[in-house]
Image (cartoon, helix red, strand yellow):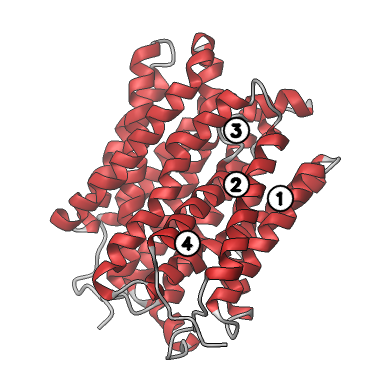
Amino acid sequence: MEKRKEKLGFVMMFVFIVMNFVMSMSGTLFNGILDRIAITMQIDVAMTGYLTSLYAYGAIGAPLLLLVFRKWSRSLMLKGTLLCNMLFGVLSIVATSFPLLLLARFMLGLFGTAYGVLATTSIAALSPPERVGKNLSLLIAGGAASLMVGVPLCRILIHAYSWQSIYLFLILLMAGGFLYFAFCLPEIGQEKEALHLHQELQMVKVHDVWMVLLCSLITFIGYEAFYTYLTPYIVAFFPALEPAMSLILVMIGACSFLGNLLGGVACDRMGYRQALWVSSLLEIVISIVIFLTTAHLYLNLFFIFLWMFNGWFIGLQLNTGINIVTNRQSNLLVSINGSVIQFAQALGASLASMIISGAGIAFNILLPIITSVMVAGLMCYRPKKSRYIN
């Protein structure tokens, strides 16, 4: 059989975007309906946060999974991880106990994150050089759409359908994507030059590299602590808004999208360090105002929107920063930074659960205040000689 030419057409790009939407939905499915899940499963709302944190803990192992199967073709690994997502998705639906559901979520985090890395590198490999950036931005749009449309839609559908039914629909979409990739995705080889593992790990010793990794860890602990329980927080303090939660989640998604977009503009003009420092200071102020205005509905809600905008603004600086400080020479460190973020999110959600159980959901916002103070302080320190990778 003649080898298929590696080419990224409109249909294939569309399938990649839809699959990215589905995978993002798989990871964030429960975020907007934690209060409903707690009622359905008859567990405390703090416990439902583990559905998110276990997914994040599983995602930490994605670089190791890709390292183990690094000799496989990228297309084969892509189809394999997508198939595993389908299988563990079915397990989560038929799970008869909460611990089994948590196990399924852990494995979904592992294979879902691995798929995301492979989809990104596949798009880059199949795109002509002059369209790599544009095609990757289109791929990421699938994930943004899940936050702006998918999560709020789940909030609406949960009144008529069980979360299992919603997830089954996602699995059917995965199956359609798998069949398309099985017949239409060309073989995509690995990079021509193998990674020098020891050399890349040596980069961690560079000041600017470990500073970005440390800031990613600290920042996303605080971000996820508040974001994971954002819906229960709003419903708890403003129960009259519960019927409008779907619209509120759409607005939250829009704020996140705008924060990411403007974060890129600020990074180009100010540099990631200065943009990160300024936005971390702003995060402190916004979080304090949120803590002090729980009795004022519209004021509190406005600053929640602003908090989400600023949170994604900060995230863009960290994701761009790790590429800048390595001069885009290390795929491994970019992957490690992603795992650090996933670990931080899992830890933040776990800490938030303990805060809710011990002090109440209102005190969740104190953790982002602490982490933002730490990051702002770290950004004030810099050696006389900035040690970027040459």
Residue toward you, 37 or 83: 83
* Secondary structure state at the residue bearing disc 1: helix
* Secondary structure state at the residue bearing disc 2: helix
Q: Which residue is drawn at the image coordinates 59% and 86% (left, top)?
A: 71
Q: CA distance from mark 2 to mark 4?
A: 18 Å
Q: Earlier in the sequence, mark 2 or mark 4?
A: 2
Badge 4 amino acid: Gly
**Which residue bears the numbered disc 2?**
26
228 is higher (above) or lower (below) than 236:
below
Q: Earlier in the sequence, mark 1 or mark 3?
A: 1
Q: Nearer the viewer, mark 1 or mark 3?
A: 1
Q: Nearer the viewer, mark 2 or mark 4?
A: 2
Q: Quadrant of the N terminus?
A: bottom right
- Tell me the tag on residue 355: 3
Q: Are marks 1 and 3 in contact (CB under 8 Å)?
A: no
**Which residue bears the numbered disc 4?**
338
